[in-house]
Amino acid sequence: MLDTGQLESIRMLTNHSMDSAAVFACLLIGQPTLRRRLKLGQLAALDQRIAVRYHMTGMTAEETTGYLKHHLALAGRSDTLFSDDAASLIHQTSRGYPRAVNNLAIAALLAAFTAGKAIADESSARAAVTEVTTE
């Protein structure tokens, strides 16, 4: 959420005693847009000072299923609320990104509820995909 001026101020902080010691350490954490912004010509100097980079990838299909089960357990549910097909479609559509998994899972549960189903099946997940991805 930092603007270009604020990012430039961070770069200026890295100039202090740059040759003798690195007295300033900073973590820049953000969405993929931060990575793209750092590649802009006006932020090239800051981009060159970044020593370590890490890009978080999406979860695997198994991790997504475990993630859904974990959140259901936190809500006090131990029974199955997503069919394997629904969990697979949620994973595929979300690419394993937690926020997208959450949005699709909630929409699938709502679709299942409105259809009078006990669990979110593939048709509920497809309705969720349509709901979430349609603008």
Image (tube, rainbow, N blue to C red):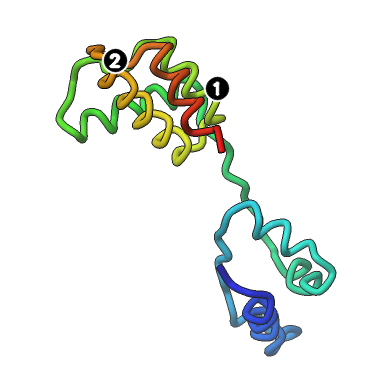
Observer-nearest of 86 and 34: 86
Number of residues whose C-alpha sits closer than 10 Å to that of mark 2, classed few (under 14), some (14–19) or many (20 or more): few
Residue reaching furthest left?
76
User: Could you tell me the amino acid type at mark 1?
Assistant: Gln
SS for tag 2? Answer: loop
Q: Tell me if 86 is positioned left or right of 47 in this view.
A: left
Mark 1 / mark 2, whichever is N-terminal: 1
Residue drawn at (37%, 30%) of the image:
107
Residue drawn at (42%, 15%) of the image:
86
Q: Tell me if 73 is positioned left or right of 60 in this view.
A: left
Q: Nearer the viewer, mark 1 or mark 2?
A: 2
Residue 99: horizontal and vertical position, in percent? 45, 41
Kindly identify which residue carries mark 2. Answer: 115
Residue 71: horizontal and vertical position, in percent? 28, 33
Query: How far apart are the alpha carbons under marks 1 and 2?
Result: 23 Å
Q: Tell me if 84 is positioned left or right of 132 in this view.
A: left
